Amino acid sequence: MQAPRTRVQRRPVHGVLLLDKPLGLSSNQALQKAKWLLRAEKAGHTGTLDPLATGVLPLCFGAATKFSQLHLDADKTYETTLRLGVKTSTGDAEGDVLEQRPVNCTVGQVVEVLDRYTGPIRQLPPMHSALKKDGKALYEYAREGVEVDREPRNVTIHELELLDMDLVSDAPTLRLKVHCSKGTYIRTLGEDIGEALGCGAHLIELRRVATGGFNLGPCVTLEQLESLPESQRSSLLLPVDALLASHTPVILNADHAARFLSGLRRRGTWPDAEQVAVWGEEPKALLGTAHIKSGELIPGRLLTPLEIQQSLESHL
């Protein structure tokens, strides 16, 4: 006879967990594990990492999920290793080997190619990606052996740094650090660099070391989270406003704060600003986001009074 399943008692949790995502788990699997460990009612992430990628994955809980969209547009930084001379069906080590070619490029050619792929470039999204076509992810088509038309997209490689290089061993590699705009496919970049070098390439390692203003320094692993007593796990969360570090702060008194939270615009002497974090004066509490145009504070995403109260209590 099967033992009855224990129902997890969920609770309101508000904040951001900077997770060092492990190898092999999808972003959603990592999110669900963290959500279960925190017994959180509501959770989301700020963009996905491939199962074969590790590194910085900000997880949002409770009120923080209202602002997770902001970090989808953030620049990202990756460290990656390319295996030269071997082209695979997926652009990474998970795929089948399609072609092997000798690696005859020189150090000078490598430097020239990396310069060529720095700055604004156009990329064709890979078939093995989560990008959707007619409501279906491209990787689902790929698994069925179907290739669909994709539109090239404009992305920017802000910096492409050569960290290490081996052009002479039986398994030649390039190790790169890539600072790029949103929507950049590192697998595609690796394949394009391999083609430009005349030998082909695929990724054998991918680690995200920064996204937006977050880096690996304060990240925790699922093992570290699980090792803590349940009562202490929430102490690893950053406050909700960690997602709004680049926003212009505006502080409202109690009367203006109440009206702002009801969705009303407020007028003041503030200069125009596209991204504003709005705070209540007493007690000091995040109310939501806004933008300012012609002296008007125009509400964006707002926290509820209950979310504000719970956030205050959790960081006492």
Image (cartoon, grey):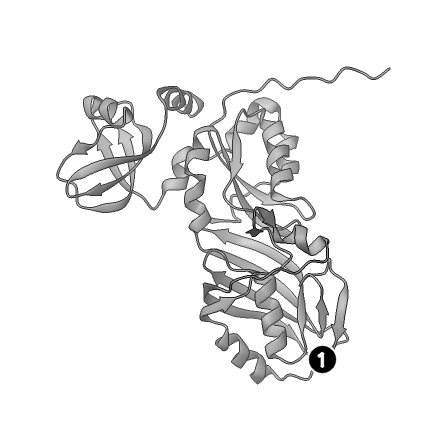
As drawn, is 68 to the left or to the right of 269?
A: right
Whether 221 is drawn above or below 144: the answer is above
Q: Position of residue 265 (x, y in %)?
A: 21, 32
Q: Residue at x 47, y 28 (%)?
A: 62
Q: Residue at x 66, y 49 (%)?
A: 51
Q: Nearer the viewer, residue 181 or 175?
A: 181
Q: Nearer the viewer, residue 6 or 81?
A: 6
Q: Position of residue 315 (x, y in %)?
A: 42, 26
Q: How many marks?
A: 1
Q: Position of residue 9 (x, y in %)?
A: 60, 17
Q: Position of residue 1 (x, y in %)?
A: 87, 15
- Say which amino acid is labelled 1: Val
Residue 106 sits in quarter: bottom right
Name the element at disc 1. loop
Extreme-front residue of the structure: 134
Label 1 sits on residue? 168
As drawn, is 308 to the left or to the right of 279?
A: right
As drawn, is 267 to the left or to the right of 274?
A: left
| Label 1: how many Cα within 10 Å (few below 14, some 14–19, many 20+) | few
Q: Residue at x 56, y 84 (%)?
A: 108
As drawn, is 70 to the left or to the right of 296?
A: right
Residue 146 in view of the camera: yes
Whether 306 is drawn above or below 47: the answer is above
